[in-house]
Image (cartoon, rainbow, N blue to C red):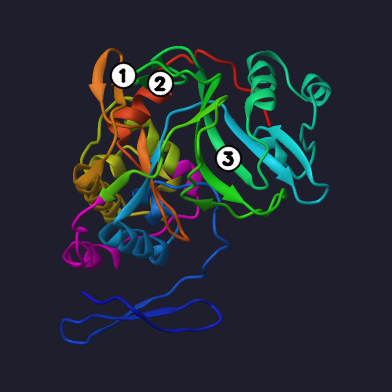
Amino acid sequence: MDLTPCSEDKLAHMRYKTACGCSIIWVSETIEMPNKHLEHPEDSILQGRKVAIDAIKELVTVTRLSVKWDGAPAIVFGTNPENGKFFVGTKSVFNKRKIKINYSHEDIDQNHQGTVGDILRLAFDYLPRINRIIQADWIGVGGGSVYTPNTIQYRFATPISQQIILAPHTEYTELSPTAEGKIGVSLESTPDCYFVDTNNATVKPPLGWRHLAKILPTLMVAKVPQSRTEIAKHINSFVRNGTLPHPKKMYDTLDAKYKGEVNVQTFKVWHMIFQLKQRLLDAINVNGTVECYIDGKPSRHEGFVTCSDTPLKIVDRLTFSQANFNLSKNWTNEKV
């Protein structure tokens, strides 16, 4: 199926032409500003029909993905183009208020406490001085071969000789609340820092357009909610329990005050995109020797991120997200 946009007006009313019969389908809704937070593709129906169509198109055409390592906390580092100084920090470097950019140990002592502060001091000492802005996930201190930075345990084939281990994944050009990140970063390891390869996942061949054709009729009659956060919380309540009930049950158990905003088809589309994502997960091939475990049982990586201008996170929510929701963290996060 060819779903190439044919026209777009000021209110973002999109018209799509299908290859089967050249019929015209209108998807009428106002498009909001893009959400920089990475979304699960199945949750796209909560954002709108066009967003859902774009997510499905991404799923059926993607061939290259970035591996999503389950590291913590997130580390942002590099050279600030405004002053030419090397810095380290958490995602708080992008804050609108209370911006925390660290150019020294003294800055770290003032801005951060506990485990996060300890990690940032190590990062400041051992990260390479690069003329870029990189976001990476902290994996651990070198010297071993088994690491559990968050929920997943990673078992490397051989001990890591470097001082610190990080998984780089996103690059920015500025430090600001509106900074746009580009997924798909590769960095050479140094004598002090081991950078894991996050760009070693592929899909061959892509899933194909036929899957979009199956979802589209239901998508066109699915209602898009206004109370998106509340509907997402309702869905996550099932994920926490490791269950995924029938769409009708998801609708029937929804708080009555939100039922008028959605219909059974809303949850059916959510299900269909979820199942399509699971097919994609089964088709992904990761090159590498690192083994993943959750609670001592073999697992796959936390997930993947599509390498595109509108990246999506591809995560097995009934395995990883459930474990992440319910596992006590072995590190203390800080409010940023």
The mark lying in front, picked from 3 and 2, is 3
Task: Give the residue drawn at x 72%, y 44%.
Answer: 79
Mark 1 or mark 3, which has the lower sequence index? 3
Q: Which residues are magenta?
A: 203-231
Rendered position, 194 above or below 12: above
Which residue is disc 3 drawn over?
135
Which residue is disc 1 drawn over?
294
| Image spot of residue 231 (x, y percent) | 43, 44
Disc 2 and disc 1: Cα gap in Å? 7 Å
Which residue is disc 2 drawn over?
151
Mark 2 or mark 1, which has the lower sequence index? 2
Residue 241 seen in the current view: yes
Amino acid tagged 2 = Thr
Density class for disc 1 (Cα within 10 Å; few <14, some 14-19, many ≥20) is some
| Image spot of residue 219 (x, y percent) | 29, 63
Q: Is residue 218 magenta?
A: yes
Say left or right for 184 vs 114: left
